Image (cartoon, grey):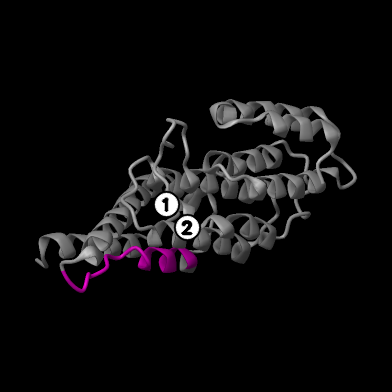
């Protein structure tokens, strides 16, 4: 549950102030004593608050508020099982496709990037092993790959940076890259357009992973080359 001080803060947040509120809650989390399980209670309370919201702007920013708590260092690294992070994300899987970057009132709304930041904070501050980190990356990657829209607000950059920071094994990266090869639509109908968008998302992520991966050297070279070759063959024809 959330104590009265945080409850009052959350009651004050509106779509117009959602972005600025991140700094407010991060500063508050850093300033108060959340020891003896209070940090974990606050995490559960914030997750509950997010799920009670009906405005998608506040639902989306709820992930950043959870990130603020994780980034404050007030939760023990072993306190949150990976399932707790997944449980926060699963109710909003469809939202990544359903909403544009701006709401009708012009407020920023971005489930895909906000979920990615949230998972990044969890991976950074929780003591997750290879399989835990892979599970979280796989969940985000599935949301990204299945989205029925053409992402256009740096989603591939945010996700690629997280994938590289997750420090997966070579085999796990090879399996991940195999999921980025292009799809083949069955006909020139509504599905064709959606698959075209999804292939564009796949190609963009593969290209950013290739560029960023060259700096850190964590991606298996053969797997990324095979993925990019598959996209070249799909669009340009086999050479």
Crowding near the residue tagged with mark 1, few <14, some 14–19, many ≥20 C-alpha atoms within 10 Å = few
Residue under the point 17% across and 71% down: 187
Q: Position of residue 7 (x, y in %)?
A: 78, 35
Q: Is residue 12 left or right of residue 195?
A: right
Magenta-span inclusion, residue 232: no
Instruction: Give the mark count.
Output: 2
Which is more toward the observer, 141 or 17?
17
Residue under the point 15% across and 60% down: 235
Q: Position of residue 111 (x, y in %)?
A: 49, 46
The quarter of the rendered structure image containing the C terminus is: bottom left
Query: Relative to 5, does residue 127 appear above or below in the rendering?
Result: below
Q: Position of residue 91 (x, y in %)?
A: 58, 58
Dot 1 falls on a residue whose secondary structure is helix
Would residue 228 be visible to someone looking at this image?
no
Q: Which residue is mark 1?
A: 98
Magenta-span inclusion, residue 186: yes
Which is more toward the observer, 177 or 17?
17
Location of residue 194 (image quadrant): bottom left
Q: Which residue is mark 2?
A: 94
As measured in the structure, the alpha-carbon distance from the residue carrying label 2 to the one carrying label 1 is 6 Å
Residue under the point 49% across and 66% down: 172
Of all residues, the one furthest to the bottom in this rendering is 186
Residue under the point 64% across and 41% down: 67
Of all residues, the one furthest to the right in this rendering is 36
Q: Is residue 48 left or right of residue 149?
A: right
Q: Is residue 192 left or right of residue 7?
A: left
Asked if the residues shown at circle 2 and circle 1 are in contact, with their CB atoms under 8 angstroms apart, the answer is: yes
Please provide the residue range marked out in magenta. 172-187
Crowding near the residue tagged with mark 2, few <14, some 14–19, many ≥20 C-alpha atoms within 10 Å = some
Dot 2 falls on a residue whose secondary structure is loop
């Amino acid at each position: 549950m959330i104590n009265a001080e945080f409850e009052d803060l959350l009651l004050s947040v509106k779509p117009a102030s959602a972005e600025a509120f991140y700094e407010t809650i991060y500063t508050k989390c850093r300033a108060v004593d959340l020891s003896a399980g209070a940090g974990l209670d606050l995490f559960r309370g914030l997750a509950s608050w997010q799920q009670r919201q009906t405005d998608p702007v506040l639902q989306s920013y709820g992930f950043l508020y959870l990130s603020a708590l994780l980034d404050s260092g007030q939760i023990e690294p072993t306190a949150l099982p990976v399932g707790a992070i997944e449980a926060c994300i699963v109710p909003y899987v469809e939202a990544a496709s359903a909403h544009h970057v701006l709401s009708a009132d012009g407020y920023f709304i971005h489930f895909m990037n906000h979920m990615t930041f949230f998972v990044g904070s969890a991976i950074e501050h929780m003591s997750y092993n290879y399989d835990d980190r892979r599970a979280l990356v796989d969940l985000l990657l599935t949301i990204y790959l299945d989205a029925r829209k053409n992402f256009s607000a740096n989603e591939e950059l945010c996700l690629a940076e997280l994938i590289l920071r997750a420090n997966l094994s070579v085999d796990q990266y090879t399996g991940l890259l195999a999921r980025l090869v292009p799809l083949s639509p069955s006909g020139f109908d509504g599905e064709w357009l959606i698959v075209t968008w999804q292939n564009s998302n796949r190609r963009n992520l593969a290209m950013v992973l290739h560029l960023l991966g060259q700096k850190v050297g964590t991606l298996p070279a053969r797997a990324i080359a095979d993925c990019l070759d598959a996209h070249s063959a799909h669009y340009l024809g086999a050479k």
